[in-house]
Image (cartoon, helix red, strand yellow):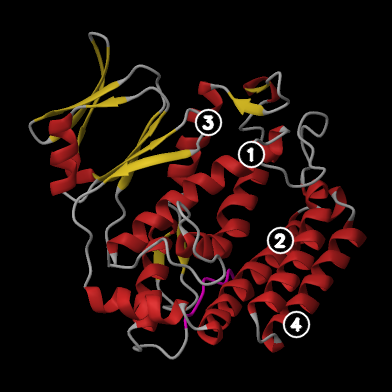
Amino acid sequence: MKRLLNTLYITTQGAYLSKEGETVVVQVGDNTLAKVPVHTLGSVVCFGQVMVSPPLMGFCAERNVSISFLTEYGRFLAKVQGPVSGNVLLRREQYRRADSAEESAKIAKSVLTAKISNSRTVLRRMLRDHPERLDSDDVLKSATRLSVSLRKVQVATTLDELRGIEGDAAHHYFSVFDNLIISQKGEFFFKGRNRRPPMDNVNCLLSFLYTLVLHDIRGACETVGLDPAVGYLHRDRPGRAGLALDMLEEFRPYLADRFVLSLINLNQVKPSGFKELETGAVTMDDETRKVVLVAYQKRKQDEITHPFLNEKVSVGILFHIQAMLFARFIRNDLDGYPPFIWQ
């Protein structure tokens, strides 16, 4: 099993990363902030005005440590990595299946089964843990409607049908999402999903977490030799990681939505850490971003029993496991793709 490696997040503006022996050195001016052995890293993610020396880029590429560059607020810009792993036969079969409407619908059905099931589990867990602090009737009704959506997914045959069912399910799920926020209600509220840019604190957190999870999924796909750009539910579009976005659907409820609720309900993030710009967009300050990144890295170290393998694994390894299972499916080692369904 692949070992869980850390992701080094650089959020300090003006930081400079360089190579010193077998370590990554992080400096701001003449001050050295950190020295991190490269063998402990799976990737480096740079937010905003962060510079990386060419020798470090080459060294990381040789050691299969990717370096990603995002804007200060989390929008993906570019990635530096070594030669793509995997063999051409795997990718050719991935492309062939993407060209088939029937195969694409089959894979999309698996992904949406997991997304809707995991969304329903988020609602049911909140009902179980906080029945006295929720509008239980509304949440229960939405959970029931998601059960209906799951049954519809099983009999759908086309991508258009599946997308329609997904849209309805997302509407039912997010219609009660505000009920799941049981702390700091005055400043953290949810009136609907919005992005590019997010217009409130909750959407700001959701968008940021989706970006982090997508980054990890994309890296996992590349590690096992899959092309992250060629998806099935998310069709080809220049600059879009279609397959990574497909797999993100499985993890949104479990690893992003529920995580955001925990950050708010446990008072790990504060309203003062968010700022509304003149455009109406909401952003996080540096300190809040660091709190979220540290908590996310810690979350990835938790253990869970994988529903298909029936083995205890770290949460951070789930992306690699799902990419590995998808590659096995593409190679015809599995009859179908077993998505991650949270028990």
Q: Which residue is labeled 4 in the image?
A: 152
Q: Residue at x 72, y 78 (%)?
A: 161
Type of amino acid under label 3: Tyr
The reply to whether the magenta stretch includes residue 282 is no
Looking at the image, residue 121 lies above or below residue 43:
below
Q: Quadrant of residue 108?
A: bottom right
Using the rendered image of the protein, determine whether residue 144 is visible from the camera's viewpoint: yes
- Residue 73's disc is 3
Image quarter (top left, top right, bottom left or bottom right) of the N terminus: bottom left
- Residue 196's disc is 1
Type of amino acid under label 1: Arg
Type of amino acid under label 2: Arg
Mark 4: secondary structure:
helix
Mark 1: secondary structure:
loop
User: Horizontal and vertical percent for residue 249?
Assistant: 58, 62
Mark 2: secondary structure:
helix
- Circle nearer the viewer, 3 or 1: 1
Label 2: how many residues lie within 10 Å, few (<14), some (14-19) or many (20+)?
A: few
* Mark closest to the chain's N terminus, 1 or 2: 2
State the separation of the CA atoms marked 1 and 2: 30 Å
Magenta-colored span: 337-343
- Circle nearer the viewer, 4 or 1: 1
* Mark closest to the chain's N terminus, 4 or 1: 4
Q: Main secondary structure of the magenta part?
A: loop
Looking at the image, residue 304 lies above or below residue 82:
below
Q: Residue at x 83, y 48 (%)?
A: 179
* Mark closest to the chain's N terminus, 4 or 2: 2
* Mark closest to the chain's N terminus, 2 or 3: 3
Q: Are marks 4 and 2 in contact (CB under 8 Å)?
A: no
User: Horizontal and vertical percent for residue 33?
Assistant: 28, 19
